[in-house]
Amino acid sequence: MANFAVLTTLLNDKDCIFGDRLNHASVIDGSRYSKAQFKRYRRNDISALEKNIMRINAQNKWIVSEGVFSMDGEIAPLPQLFNLVKKYQCKLIIDDAHGLGVLGEGGRGSIKYYQLPVKNVSILIGTFGKSFGTMGAFVAGNGLLIETLIQFARGYIYTTALPPAIASATYTSLRLIQEENWRREHLRLLIKGFHQGSQDLNLPISPSITPIQTIIVGDTKKTLEVAQWLKQKGILVGCIRPPTVPHNTARLRINLTVHHTKHDVDFLLETLSKIWNEIH
Ligand SMILES: Cc1ncc(COP(=O)(O)O)c(C=O)c1O
């Protein structure tokens, strides 16, 4: 709703949105329903994006990207996006649903991870449904922008606000995220252990350094079988398949959390290695 509200409220028919092809559905829907032209670029293809930006005539050019891509956990090439923003006076919207809480000092997300100036981002959007462990979302930007959303964003105005209990829990999550660095350190060690173990077993994992780890199996049926087999062993792993991801890229999506232990990761790897040999 936050992505949808921002994109449909602020952009007009003289604008153009340049969106990464793998942006989340809520960003794509907001882009489609806004009055702006909508151009998609291939995942992280900065040169295609630049060509499009040069080619298209629009009053405002908005680049919209996830900070961390939800389907494989990889971090967007924010330094290159920041360069384009500067070079062509574009505006940048970052949905950092999966970066906030886990990346950068104090869990400030993917922008902090790259040590980039947050002032170059026109709008930062985040959900509370991931590392915060609650629900809802926020939009951050300058005062005029926020006031405009409060007055005009239909997706914000015509729906009940967050229940106070959720708002309060989110506030506590924010404090924990800012103060308890050990959680990120623990996650970092789990991720490192998972990578080392996967390499030893020759598992084709994505190069993600975030808690979202994926193993591309390719075939949908096989991926489902592996996910179901893991579930029988007590391991819950997402099975992401078309149309959510392109054909022949069905994958297991593993989410490591601060509540996992080294033992959990070892058990996952051991169990995966058994089934992996069987399906190949
Ligand atoms: C990048 C991104 N943005 C937005 C959302 C929506 O978040 P929520 O489910 O908390 O509404 C998700 C996840 O579902 C996401 O991955």
Image (cartoon, grey):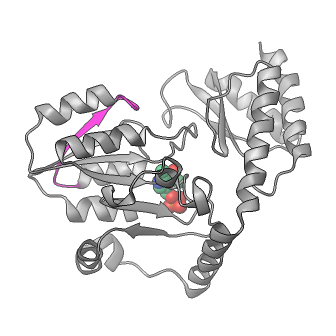
Q: Is residue 127 left or right of residue 232?
A: left
Q: Is residue 160 left or right of residue 60?
A: right
- Indicate whether 150 appears above or below 248: below
Residue 78 on image: x %, y %: 41, 43
Residue 151 on image: x %, y %: 24, 80
Residue 1 appears anywhere in the view: no
The quarter of the rendered structure image containing the C terminus is top right
Q: Nearer the viewer, residue 20 or 54?
A: 54
* Residue at 61% over, 30% down: 207
* Residue at 55% over, 52% down: 98
Q: Does residue 117 belong to the magenta stretch?
A: no
Q: Does residue 44 belong to the magenta stretch?
A: yes
Residue 261 on image: x %, y %: 87, 50
Q: Nearer the viewer, residue 37 or 176?
A: 176
In the displayed image of the protein, which residue is found farthest to the bottom? 164
* Residue at 33% over, 61% down: 119
Report which quarter residue 23 is drawn in: top left
* Residue at 81% over, 57% down: 259
Residue 159 appears anywhere in the view: yes
Q: Is residue 156 left or right of residue 200?
A: left
Q: Is residue 86 left or right of residue 108?
A: left
In the displayed image of the protein, which residue is found farthest to the top? 280
- Indicate whether 224 appears above or below 262: above
Q: Nearer the viewer, residue 20 or 103?
A: 103
Q: Which residues are magenta?
A: 34-45
- Indicate whether 20 appears above or below 8: above
Residue 156 on image: x %, y %: 35, 74
